[in-house]
């Protein structure tokens, strides 16, 4: 049976007259990795700080392993929450070896137990042969892993990570995000991290909460966020794509400038009449034999693929992700066909 480690119940926080978190709720089960995803200033780091106990709540409740740790006018000190924290800058002590950095939070253990524990943690993160080195002698990615080992060493109930990959270059960030997930899963940790990078969220998290202006728009897994976004804001923030005007004739088909579309509807209510349909780049296939032609408006070369922005005969725009050996310039016309599997529709309004 699942065990709820963290539960946020309608929490709110404000700075002066400015509400930075508004009635936000989520649940994180034991062994799950959660992520708060959103643009800078959306309130995600404030949520992390309230969970850690660094800031009080104005409204709502924070429950950790069934115990209330925060509510209005009542905040359990951070040291009593059994929470580990990985900061954005890692916060390693430069004058201490990697061994002593990891051992810093284990002062209550006997020396022999401390040695065993630190050795286990450094082995877990792949640095068991570097215990005598200092932080300046290792790479940024290795520093991140040391910070992770130090946070996990006291066996916290919950691990919090604040933008853990932001100080790394793009290539290292992608590799380390997968490594961190492997480490957390091998340890069985329950963790919550914040990021503005959806690729990091997809690579690491089991459940992702998209935030905007202090509110939680959707708390779901990556597949559901991408293929069944709850609203236009989630659709615009997660992944790529464009909204294509259409007419929903029944529960199975929608008429658009891309042709008649059919697939699995993701709307809670059956769409009727004028709608906007979310078309992802992979929904549009380059096919020279197709009767549907579109003008190349823009090309974004990405190495293995090219993201084309195309204008349909109707004047509407769509995007297509095409292998880069098909090289087309703006102004050219190419054949396309639809391969829409998930029909995400919104009531007709101005596109976002």
Image (tube, helix red, strand yellow):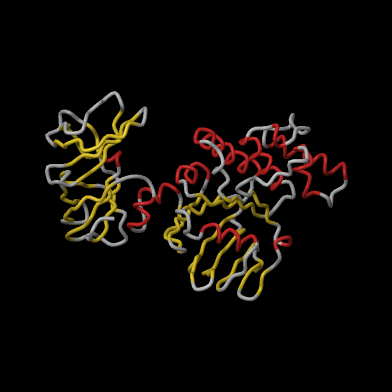
Task: Tell me the residue at 67%/36% (across/down).
Answer: 125
**Quarter that holds the N terminus:** bottom right
Q: Position of residue 245 (x, y in %)?
A: 19, 53
Q: Position of residue 287 (x, y in %)?
A: 20, 30
Count of numbered badges drawn on the protein: 0
Task: Tell me the residue at 52%/61% (across/down).
Answer: 26
Image-based side of 261 in relation to 50, left or right: left
**Quarter that holds the C terminus:** bottom left
Q: Position of residue 96 (x, y in %)?
A: 78, 40
Note whether 22 is above or below 229 in the view shown.
Answer: below
Note whether 80 is above or below 103 in the view shown.
Answer: below
Q: Position of residue 130 (x, y in %)?
A: 74, 31
Task: Tell me the residue at 20%/33% (across/down).
Answer: 330
Image-based side of 324 in relation to 247, left or right: right
Image-based side of 86 in relation to 128, left or right: left
Task: Tell me the residue at 30%/57% (across/down).
Answer: 267
Note whether 140 is above or below 163 in the view shown.
Answer: above
Note whether 329 is above or below 86 in the view shown.
Answer: above
Question: Splitting the image into 4 quarters, where does residue 6 fall?
Answer: bottom right
């Amino acid at each position: 049976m699942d065990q709820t480690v963290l539960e946020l119940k309608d929490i709110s926080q404000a700075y002066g007259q400015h509400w930075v978190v508004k009635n936000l709720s989520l649940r994180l089960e034991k062994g799950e990795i959660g992520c708060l995803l959103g643009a800078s200033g959306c309130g995600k780091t404030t949520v992390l700080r309230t969970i850690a106990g660094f800031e009080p709540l104005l409204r709502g409740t924070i429950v950790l392993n069934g115990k209330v740790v925060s509510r209005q006018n009542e905040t359990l000190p951070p040291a009593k929450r059994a929470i580990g924290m990985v900061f954005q800058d890692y916060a390693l002590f430069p004058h201490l070896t990697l061994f002593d950095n990891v051992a810093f939070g284990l002062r209550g253990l006997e020396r022999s137990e401390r040695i065993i524990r630190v050795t286990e943690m450094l082995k877990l993160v792949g640095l068991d042969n570097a215990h005598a080195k200092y932080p300046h002698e290792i790479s940024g990615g290795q520093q991140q892993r040391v910070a992770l080992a130090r946070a996990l060493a006291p066996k916290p109930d919950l691990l919090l990570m604040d933008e853990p990959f932001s100080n790394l270059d793009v290539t290292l960030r992608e590799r380390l995000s997968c490594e961190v997930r492997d480490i957390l899963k091998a340890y069985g940790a329950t963790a919550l991290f914040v990021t503005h990078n959806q690729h990091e969220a997809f690579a690491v998290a089991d459940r992702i909460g998209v935030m905007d202006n202090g509110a939680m728009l959707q708390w779901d897994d990556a597949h559901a966020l991408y293929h069944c976004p709850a609203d236009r804001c989630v659709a615009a923030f997660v992944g790529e794509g464009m909204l294509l005007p259409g007419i929903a004739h029944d529960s199975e088909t929608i008429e658009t400038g891309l042709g008649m579309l059919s697939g699995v509807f993701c709307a809670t209510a059956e769409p009727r009449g004028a709608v906007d349909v979310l078309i992802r780049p992979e929904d549009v296939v380059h096919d020279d034999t197709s009767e549907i032609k579109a003008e190349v408006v823009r090309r974004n070369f990405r190495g293995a693929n090219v993201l084309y922005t195309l204008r349909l005969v109707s004047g509407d725009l769509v995007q297509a992700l095409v292998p880069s050996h098909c090289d087309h310039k703006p102004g050219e016309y190419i054949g396309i066909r639809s391969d829409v599997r998930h029909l995400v529709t919104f009531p007709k309004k101005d596109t976002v």
